[in-house]
Image: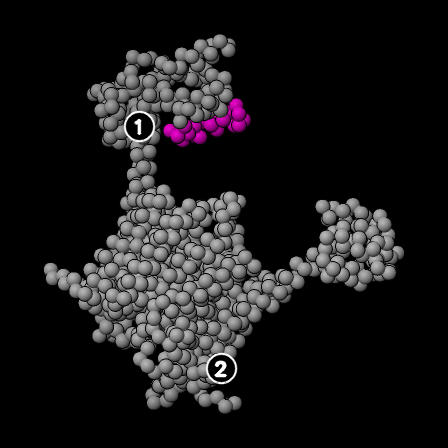
Amino acid sequence: MYLAISYTFQNVLLGTTLLGVVGGVLGCFALLRKQSLLGDALAHASLPGVCLAFLWMGTKDTYSFLIGAIFTGVLGSLFVLGVVRGTRIKEDSAIGIVLSVFFGVGVVLLTWIEKNHQSGNQSGLSHILYGQAATLMERDVWIFVIAGVIILGTIFLFYKELKLLCFDREYGKSLGYPMAALEILVTCLLVITVVIGLQTVGVILIIASLITPAACARQWTDRFSWMLLLAGLIGGLSSVAGTFVSEQFHRIPTGPTIVLVSSSVLIISILFAPQRGILWSWLQSASFRRRIREENLLKDIYGWVEKRNDWSRWPSLSNLMGVRGQSGIKIKKIARPLEHGGLLLVTEKAMKLTEKGLEEAERIVRKHRIWELYLARRLDLPPDHVHRDAEAMEHALSDEALAEFEELLGYPKFDPHGQPIPARRGSSSKAESKATGGV
Amino acid sequence: MWGLEPSHWTVLIVGALVATSCALLGVFLVLRKVAMLGDAISHAVLPGIAIAFLISGDRAPLLMIFGAAAVGVLTVFLVGILNRTRRLKEDASIGVVFPALFSIGVILVSYFAGKIDLDPDCIIFGEILLSHLDRIVIGGVDIGPKAYYVCGPILALNILLIGTLYKELKVTSFDPALAASLGISPTLIHYLLMSQVSITVVGSFESVGAILVVAMLVVPPAAAYLFTHRLWTMILLSVGFGILSSTIGFFIGWWKNCSMAGSMAAAAGGVFVLAFLFAPQQGLFARIWVRKNLRTRFRSQLILLHLQDEVAVQLEILRKRFGWSQRRLDNAIQRLVRQGLVERIDQGVKLTSSGLAQLEASGTESLSHRVE
């Protein structure tokens, strides 16, 4: 593999990476404030600003572009704010209006410039749409560095205030922080990022660098500080990877490649991130379902014996198959981990609960019957209606909640069907004495 | 005719066709709070166009529209899936999906640069002026610009959709739960609407460009929304605003010799700003006026309450008691005088007989209640 770190490539790599990092960090604020598409509007709204700056200064200069873009960008975001606050029009329409109208004005200016200024300047402006990472100069990269330092520095300085802005704007206001000013500050930072992005990935793809890394980072953590760091990291690394890939294939432009890399990271994040990932929650619900099946088996064995009131005879596999209509293979499968856990003794003829298994089964039956009693007594449900509900609840009820229900019901001995509620073992002697004392 | 060349008439007609098509659908996008889906679709269809191009090797309009509409629906579908995972909010889902699809499109276009004669510039900006030159010739007979035969049927389709599914669209837009209980599937209607949006966006592309389509989808309906809360009126108004914007935009573009699509979008913005300022109830000035009026009414009621004990009072005392500026006091007094409830006496005001009657009739209770 031939990888020439040429001078131009070095500039491109630095520029896109900086954009990735800054866009990722800043995107977190937009994402958490549910204003992801504001970046889209700002990106479009900066076009007329850039054109105006060009008309004013007559040169293609990043600094004047920046000032022009900030001007129209802030104007656009104020417009969105005014329309949303003042009328019945919702934010999405307001953003759509700013986006299309400002951009339309920008296009008018752009074509006007092209027709009236012949001095070969058109090259600079039309790249704004798609960006031309390959034309990045060392000077541009320096401007990026400065802008990046300013943006990240501002976020660092106002970290606490900006965090408040994202999570509890009203609380921040009541503490006396100037929340409106902070909002405009974030908008300015967004516009600066957008202008950096204009030259590297273009108007349309800049929005991806503002949203996608932040959306990825959100999947991996619930902590704000970690989210910022991760988003910056993901944004930066996606840019590095995308830039290298597009360098390998000469006809693939850099910006879109970066977007596709970060989009792939997002898919991976949504599928595989711990806690929030789809795979994770699927596994969790699978393990919960397995636990339910195991608990039901223990309960069924207990119930079978209890019904015959003969604690020396245990049910066979075929007896248990009759209870829920499960196949023998399935019951064996459920029983295996219970056997390994020492709760169950499986012989040719019978499935026998061990001491530990009996204790566990009683615990579940207790939950079931106490919940039934609670529904019947407290919620006045007829006794023949409570079984189904308790069947689901017994697996979800925590031991602490159970204790409270017990106390609430006055340590009952029988469920609404007249079946005994198994006594609590070991540590529950106190509760028992209390209960007998009450009688 | 009227000093306009035939090509200008083409532009005007195509502009009006597109504006009408978009305004019809846009009303529902704005009401359903999915205006940005229109924007997303307009960018995301690029890969669909590119793939259609690769297959046909030509600008076959039907295949392109079909390909793009498919990708448009795919966009809506992907946004829906991301949304349903509940890992991302709706706006973030939109913002993630369409740049990714657009990227695929850009990569396809640049990778097969030799095979796809497609200028992304043209897709974004469009060049409505050229629509006059691209004509359909059958058997040597020129039957008019191609844009007519693309935009016209699309408009007809949109009218057909809204005409036949008006009730369904209305109920799903305002109360999806009610719609579901009536047996109308909100999802089905949503996808129908969105595929029609995709078709409209794509069909309008070549002639006017994405940016004008987005402008026409969102801006005129939003402006119309400021004037009315009746769906029918809103549809008619937004069509009117759309045609007005495209016409004004045409003349600006003609006059300044700049992008017609851009100036049409800008004109739509102008129409919206006017609506934002001057709409009868939702407009900025109307709201300021209503607020001012309420304040004056409130003040004049305070004065009336004050007068029930004293009948006549010096203006200076009122001013001191309430701490109002001279102008505010004058406005309130003027209102009372106009209603004939008080009359001016030397340096002060006095309750008239009708004022007294009013005070007694309305009951001081109800007035004092308002004062609290």
Q: Which residue is mark 2?
A: B251
- Report how far apart the C-alphas of labels 1 and 2 lie in the structure: 77 Å
Q: Can residue A121 be found in the magenta stretch?
A: no
Give residue A294's mark. 1
Image quadrant where residue B5 sits? bottom left
Q: Quadrant of the N terminus of chain A?
A: bottom left
Asked which secondary structure carries label 1, the reply is helix
Find residue A292 and report its horizontal and vertical position in percent: 34, 30
Q: Can residue A381 be found in the magenta stretch?
A: yes
Q: Is A399 or B236 nearer to us in this picture?
A: A399
Residue A246 visible here = no
Q: Chain of mark 2?
A: B
Badge 2: residue crowd in 10 Å (few <14, some 14–19, many ≥20) = some
Q: Chain of mark 1?
A: A
Badge 1: residue crowd in 10 Å (few <14, some 14–19, many ≥20) = some
Residues in magenta, as a range = A375-397
Q: Residue at x 20, y 60 (%)?
A: A244
Q: Is residue B299 left or right of residue B80?
A: right
- The prevailing secondary structure element of the residues shown in magenta is helix
